[in-house]
Amino acid sequence: MSDVADSLLPTPVHVAIIMDGNGRWATARGLPRSAGHRAGVEALRATVRNAGDFGVKWLTVYAFSSENWSRPQSEVSDLMGLLKLFIRRDLADLHKNDVRVRIIGARHNLQTDIRKLLEDAERLTRNNSKLNLVIAFNYGGRDEIVRAARRIAKDAIAGKVDPDQVAASDFSALLDTADIPDPDLLIRTGGDMRLSNFLLWQAAYSELVFLPCLWPDFSRSQFADAIAAFGVRERRFGGVNAAGAG
C-alpha cells in the first residue's frame, strides 16, 4: 500500500502501542529472552522515526508495567539495563529531532538512578514539539485510577471538593495523562486481544488494532496498515453515524 504520508485518509493524532512478543520472538529463534528485548528496542527506535514521518503527534508505548516486577529478577535487571541504554544512547537524537519525552506511571518506588534518568530525559526535551514520545514505565491502568481516586477522596475529606460535583473531566485531570489527549488508535502486537491494564480510562473510545506479528517484527508497512485501518473506521463516540444507525 502507499505510505501514510501520501494517503488522504485521516491520521490519528495519538497512537498507543502494547509492544508484545519479545520473549516469543527470541524463543522461536532459540535465543534467550534478553535477545528478544534487545530486538524490541530496535523496533521501538524505528517506530518512533516512523511515527514522526507519518505525522503522528503523540506516541505512547507500554515499556514496563507495574506487574512486570514479578518477572524473574534477571529479566527485570535486563529490562532496566535496556531502558538505560535506550535513553542514554538515543536521547541526544530524540532531542535533535524535536521529540519530547514524557513518562507516565508511578515513580515513588523507582530506584533513584532510574527515576533521575527518566526525569533528566523529560527535562532536556520539554520544549520540543514535533513528536511527543510517552513512555509508560512502572505503569498500570488500575493503579493510575486508584491513585487518582485517592486524591479525590482526600480532597473530599478536606472539604475541597463536593463528591456529587465530580465530573469525568475532573477525574481525568488527576491521571498521569492529564494534559495528554486520549489515544485515537491503540495497536497491540503479538496476537493477544486484550488491553493488559494499559490506558484503561483513556482508551474508552480508541480504535483497536490487534496484529499477529511479534513486536521485534513490527515494520513500517504494518504501522502504515494499522493507521490506514483507523482511517476508514467511523468513530461515533457512543453516538450514531450519519445514516442514523446505532
Image: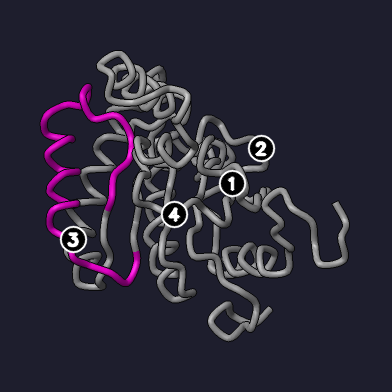
The reply to whether callout 4 and callout 2 are in contact (CB within 8 Å) is: no
Q: How is the image coloured?
A: one colour
Residue 10 image-quadrant placement: bottom right
Which residue in the protein does label 3 denote? 125
Q: Earlier in the sequence, mark 3 or mark 2?
A: 3
10 Å crowding of disc 3: few (<14), some (14-19), many (20+) = many
* Quadrant for the N terminus in the image: bottom right
158, above or below 15, in the image: above
**Residue at mark 1 to residue at mark 3: CA–CA distance:** 27 Å
**Residue at mark 3 to residue at mark 2: CA–CA distance:** 34 Å
10 Å crowding of disc 2: few (<14), some (14-19), many (20+) = few
Q: Residue at x 39, y 63 (%)?
A: 48
Q: Which residues are magenta?
A: 102-131
Estimate the x, y position of residue 169 in percent, counting from the top left: 45, 42
The reply to whether callout 1 and callout 3 are in contact (CB within 8 Å) is: no
Residue type at tag 4: Pro
**Residue at mark 4 to residue at mark 2: CA–CA distance:** 25 Å
**Label 1 SS:** strand
Residue type at tag 1: Arg
Which residue in the protein does label 2 denote? 192
The reply to whether callout 2 and callout 1 are in contact (CB within 8 Å) is: yes
Q: Is residue 186 visible?
A: yes
- Left/right placement of residue 241 relative to residue 144 reads right
Residue type at tag 2: Asp
Q: Is residue 188 on the magenta stretch?
A: no
Q: Residue at x 44, y 30 (%)?
A: 166
Q: Earlier in the sequence, mark 3 or mark 4?
A: 3
Which residue in the protein does label 1 denote? 188
**Residue at mark 4 to residue at mark 1: CA–CA distance:** 19 Å
**Residue at mark 2 to residue at mark 1: CA–CA distance:** 8 Å
Q: Earlier in the sequence, mark 1 or mark 3?
A: 3
Q: Which mark is in front, 3 or 4? A: 4
